Amino acid sequence: MRSYRHWLLALLLLGLAAVALVAAAPPAQAQTVAPAGLPPGAIPPAQAGDDTACRLCHQDTDGEFTLPSGETRSARVDMDSLAHSAHGAADLACTDCHDGNRFGQPHEEPTAADFRAFELENNASCVRCHGAPHITSHEATAENPEPNAVCTDCHGSHDVATVADWPAADQADRCIDCHDASDEVRLLVISSAGLFTDTVDENYCLSCHREDGPGLMLGDDEPVSTQFDESAFRSSVHGEDNEWGEISCRHCHENATPYPHPAVEAADHRDYSLAMSENCAACHDHNFELAQDSVHADALADGDRDAAVCTDCHGFHNVVPAAEPRSNVSQICRQCHSTIYDEYATSVHGDSLLNDENQDVPTCIECHGVHNIGDPTTNLFRIRSPQLCAECHANELLMNKYEISTNVFDSYVADFHGTTVTLFEHQDPNVETNKAVCYDCHGVHAITDPDDPEAGIKANLLETCQQCHPDASENFPDSWTSHFEPSLEHNPIVFLVNSFYAIIIPLTVGGLGFLVVTDVYRRVRTRGSGDRDE
């Protein structure tokens, strides 16, 4: 009996010892599981405490906490929303975001001055796991809390949506809290395009600029459309279908920032165009440098804001391949030089290009150049203009297609006009000369067919000559052989006279030479015979 009591006492002592050990053990820590995609250790371990204790108080409490500013906030947490949030799926503990040392029981009094400061303090908890996965213009700090946003402004605190749930219409409501003047759908597209991008890519830009929005208001209150024609860009030299590779928005708009963009400081649309054209130099530096030596750049430097820059000729987004079609060239120049275009369009060159689609005839750039366009009013341009005409009219392969003489340049250089001009060009091309060049007789832009009754030659040749020779008589033009070499068909008298002299002069010189040679021979021989007789 005594033995039985001893065993019972021993078992009782062992039971009391076990209870004491359990009571002395530290409370179990809440389990933490890192969300998929985050590196190991990204989530700090839970602090001492159990989620059960947090949930018991905060799931159905009517309690509030008061900040020094007097603001009050509910302490209640919607546990159902938390369970279905991105963090609920990751099985995070309360103390992973709310430091257990700080938020232990009993809770400390809030130190934040107001609720905004309280949000900024808690914002640091998000950064411990979510470094910088996507661009943002909402970098709120304690020094600059407004009007920027913190993580919880967009993502919520306990009801954090997953990435898959973000393209939902109700997410745009968060944006409208600040961007109350914007469209819900547009804000939704912007936020979806901006998620997890490292740079401002074209999808981010096109989320707004595919549609015609409110436009850009410049300093003079002139509205500028911000709509981007994507199809036109894709078919341009900068789009996908080109041999150089596609460029994106930021190649040209290199100073663009995430939405909202800073205010544009341009005074008006022209100022904006002038500023944007500078970006072309980044890729097209050679042509850009050539353009700086042009008559357009000189005019711009002199204060003419209407002088052409890159975008005036090439466009912005719908940049077409150079000279495709060639008729586009004159149409582009027409934007500023409409009067000259009207003359060119009715000329033998313009009519053939615009109406007959003849690709052989010259456009504006063949005579004036492309980027380094010189001043056509200078003496240098005038004295070298015959060389421009010779580019086509001395080309036998090209001229033979149209049965046009290729001797026009050589015949011009050989006559008194061309010889004088050539001398001036070699000695001092900048000296003014009144000697006739091609366009003095044929016209500059309104060049007509030689058979045209209104042309400045043939029937009206005397009037053309009288522009420089006011005293010229009716037979004055007869002294000019035109661009033809004299023949029985063209200028037969001159041809016969030239032929006569071509024959008689060699015969005369040859005969005289023969007489001189024979006379010398006779004298030498006679002197030799006299010496022998002595």
Image: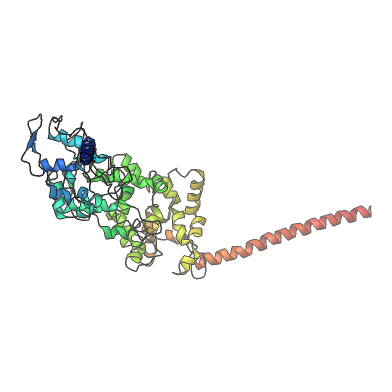
Q: Which residue is drawn at the image coordinates 46% and 66% (left, top)?
A: 399
Indicate whether 248 appears above or below 47: below
Nearest the eye: 44 or 290: 44
> Residue 502: x, y in percent?
61, 63
> Residue 375: x, y in percent?
38, 46
Nearest the eye: 106 or 297: 106
> Residue 352: x, y in percent?
35, 66
Quadrant of the frame with the N terminus: top left
Is 55 situated left or right of 261 in this image? Answer: left
Choose top left, top right, bottom left or bottom right for residue 75. Answer: top left
Residue sticking out furthest to the left: 62
Is 263 situated left or right of 474 in this image? Answer: left
Is 174 situated left or right of 385 in this image? Answer: left
Indicate whether 410 appears above or below 217: below
Nearest the eye: 448 or 202: 202
> Residue 224: x, y in percent?
20, 49
Residue 455 at least partly seen: no
Choose top left, top right, bottom left or bottom right for residue 126. Answer: top left
Indicate whether 132 appears above or below 203: above
